[in-house]
């Protein structure tokens, strides 16, 4: 059994249901401490839902570090996993790592405990080969990515910002690939802006509509206009901004009552061509145009970020090509990730991990054949960044 597979299985065996780390970070910290990493636990959140965060850093030292400028690369990820769902639908216990049919099964196998194991072993191999590299290396791990994400990576980033810590590059181990490890990476993500709209009318008997104001009817023309709007055209890296309604609720439960209000939940997934403020203004202008009596509560889930081709992207593309022969697709599709927080303090952030077809599903798995290439890609990225720092 490879060292990467062994560590992945040890992590999967820990039932780290968000926000419980279940000892995963202690296991990783012990491996890193043996390499000279200084490991710090940063806890946050209420006592009954305490979030565990690990910041571990190995600073460059030695002759090479003294002779040239140093840079810091961060490996970021999460040790928490989503709930298993019905246990009787799993073909093996979700927290008993199981190999069958050329795959490793278990909750977190793809999202993202194998990535974490690959991070650790890649760094172990790199440090053994380059003990006095001018490249500083850090790990930023949280147990609050699958949960609210309010006491995890965002808290650590705030601490690092207050300390004046400078991050140059970051690789987030999210499962980004489609068919084979390395066939797609995320060099950015769209922003997320959610809203809850309440439109007021006047409740009344459905047989006497002239004595009531139906808020569903009042909202309908504005809703049709919003559905048809083009918010922006996107750009070479991002698709156009989308607006989607996720829920509509009105009514008292009685079929003969015109409701007094309608509540609509919606979400923007927006590109770098738009801002939350501009989207809010445009949407509210439509509501005002239709003279609606309304209120909106807004939630910014995350701002978009983009890492254009450059040092980190080039190092990653070269590593994937050398390891797999694949020409990697750069993508900004999908949901949000903790990369949105890290991008506030780090100029170059990408996400790279295994295929994501089974994430959050019953019988989550990763192909055994994808594990070692993933570790090797991470190691090759370190080698590529190290090479450019040689004095």
Image (cartoon, rainbow, N blue to C red):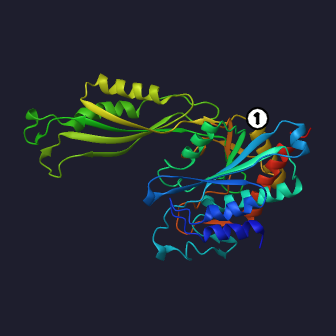
**Residue 206, above or below 103:** above
> Horizontal placement of 94 versus 262: left or right?
right
- Examine the rendering and report whether any part of residue 337 can be seen: no
Q: Nearer the viewer, residue 173 or 253?
A: 173
Return the x and y of residue 326 as percentages of the image width and height: 78, 50
**Residue 271, above or below 133:** above
Q: Nearer the viewer, residue 77 or 31?
A: 31
**Residue 164, above or below 150:** above
Q: Residues within 10 Å of mark 1 (few under 14, many from 20)?
A: few
Q: Which residue is mark 1?
A: 310
Return the x and y of residue 375 as percentages of the image width and height: 76, 58
> Horizontal placement of 11 versus 193: left or right?
right
- Examine the rendering and report whether any part of residue 154 can be seen: yes
Return the x and y of residue 383 as percentages of the image width and height: 84, 48
Return the x and y of residue 164 as percentages of the image width and height: 66, 36
Residue at the (9%, 33%) spot, across then down: 210
Q: Nearer the viewer, residue 107 or 137?
A: 137
> Horizontal placement of 250 versus 38: left or right?
left
Residue at the (83%, 59%) spot, across then down: 125
**Numbered disc 1: secondary structure:** loop
């Amino acid at each position: 059994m490879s060292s990467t597979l062994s560590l992945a299985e040890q992590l999967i065996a820990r039932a780290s249901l968000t926000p419980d780390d279940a000892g995963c970070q202690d296991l990783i910290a012990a491996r890193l401490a043996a390499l000279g990493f200084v490991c710090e636990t940063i806890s946050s959140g209420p006592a009954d839902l305490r979030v565990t965060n690990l910041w571990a850093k190995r600073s460059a030292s030695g002759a090479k570090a003294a002779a040239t400028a140093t840079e810091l690369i961060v490996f970021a990820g999460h040790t928490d996993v989503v709930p298993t769902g019905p246990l009787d639908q799993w073909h093996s216990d979700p927290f008993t790592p199981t190999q069958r049919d050329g795959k490793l099964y278990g909750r977190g196998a793809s999202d993202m405990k194998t990535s974490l194991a690959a991070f650790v072993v890649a760094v172990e191999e790199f440090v053994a080969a380059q003990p006095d590299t001018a490249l500083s290396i850090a790990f930023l791990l949280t147990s609050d990515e699958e949960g609210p994400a309010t006491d995890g990576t965002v808290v650590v980033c705030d601490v690092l910002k207050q300390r004046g810590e400078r991050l140059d590059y970051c690789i987030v181990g999210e499962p980004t690939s489609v068919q084979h490890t390395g066939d797609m990476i995320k060099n950015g993500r769209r922003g997320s802006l959610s809203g809850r709209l309440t439109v007021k009318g006047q409740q009344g008997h459905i047989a006497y509509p002239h004595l009531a104001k139906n808020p569903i009817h009042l909202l309908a023309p504005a809703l049709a206009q919003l559905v048809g709007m083009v918010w922006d055209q996107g750009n070479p890296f991002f698709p156009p901004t989308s607006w989607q309604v996720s829920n509509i609720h009105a009514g008292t439960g009685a079929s003969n009552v015109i409701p007094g209000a309608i509540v609509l939940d919606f979400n923007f997934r927006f590109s770098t061509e738009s801002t939350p403020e501009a989207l809010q203004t445009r949407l509210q202008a439509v509501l005002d145009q239709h003279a609606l009596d309304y209120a909106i509560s807004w939630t910014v889930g995350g701002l978009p970020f983009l890492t254009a081709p450059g040092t980190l992207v080039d190092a990653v593309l070269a590593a994937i090509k050398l390891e797999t022969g694949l020409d990697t697709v750069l993508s900004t599709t999908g949901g949000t990730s903790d990369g949105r927080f890290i991008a506030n303090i780090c100029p170059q952030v990408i996400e790279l991990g295994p295929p994501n077809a089974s994430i959050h599903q019953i019988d989550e798995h990763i192909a055994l054949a994808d594990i070692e290439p993933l570790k090797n890609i991470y190691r090759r990225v370190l080698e590529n960044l190290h090479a450019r720092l040689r004095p």
